[in-house]
Image (tube, helix red, strand yellow):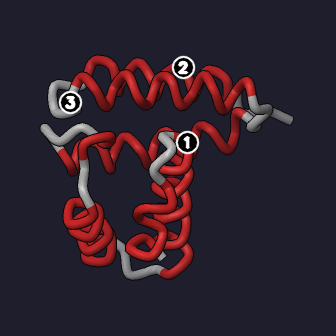
Amino acid sequence: MPTDDFEKRVDDTLLIIQESDSIHPRNKQLIADYKRDKILDGLKHSTLSENLSRLKLVAEHVGDRPFDEMDKSDVENLVEWLHSEYDNQNTLYTYKSVVKSLWRWMGRGEEYFETVE
């Protein structure tokens, strides 16, 4: 029975992020650091692969705005965009969870949790 090579998926997704012209360089670095720390925390590569794919789409959407410089209004706009893109509640929940995970990792989670709920 074939199994997915999630470690390779993680590396491939990170490479796509690093090579993207539509993702701010600071966000590329934040995502790479987030990936490293999550691996060190013991997060499974299967989960990390999905999280990085979602962060890639979020980073493409915010464009030239670094995650760590986004204010509450920026996050509200991001959540509004997620609602306009995805009407499936499970998908929305997953994206919001990944965004909360990133903001918590950046030490900014409490500022925006209400917005991302």
Instruction: Residue lying at the far right in this picture: please name it.
Output: 1
Q: Tell me which label, 2 or 1, sits earlier in the chain.
A: 2
Position of residue 106 relative to residue 11, above or below, is below
Dot 1: within a 10 Å radius of its alpha carbon, few (fewer than 14), some, or many (20 or more) residues? some
Secondary element type, mark 1: helix
The kind of residue on which mark 2 rests is Asp
Q: CA distance from mark 2 to mark 3?
A: 19 Å
The kind of residue on which mark 3 rests is His
Q: Residue at x 70, y 33 (%)?
A: 45
Q: Tell me which label, 2 or 3, sits earlier in the chain.
A: 2
The N terminus: image quadrant: top right
Dot 2: within a 10 Å radius of its alpha carbon, few (fewer than 14), some, or many (20 or more) residues? some
- From the viewer's perspective, tell me whether residue 61 is left or right of residue 17: left
Give percent across and percent down for residue 41.
75, 32
Q: CA distance from mark 3 to mark 1?
A: 18 Å
Q: Tell me which label, 3 or 1, sits earlier in the chain.
A: 3
Give percent across and percent down for residue 105.
55, 42
- The residue to which callout 2 is attached is 11
- From the viewer's perspective, tell me whether residue 13 is left or right of residue 94: left
Mark number displayed over residue 105: 1
Q: Nearer the viewer, mark 3 or mark 1?
A: 1
Secondary element type, mark 3: loop
Marks 2 & 3, CB-CB < 8 Å contact: no
Q: Residue at x 61, y 20 (%)?
A: 8
Give percent across and percent down for residue 71.
24, 56
- The residue to which callout 3 is attached is 24
Secondary element type, mark 2: helix
Give percent across and percent down for residue 15.
41, 18
- From the viewer's perspective, tell me whether residue 62 is left or right of residue 17: left
Q: CA distance from mark 2 to mark 1?
A: 20 Å
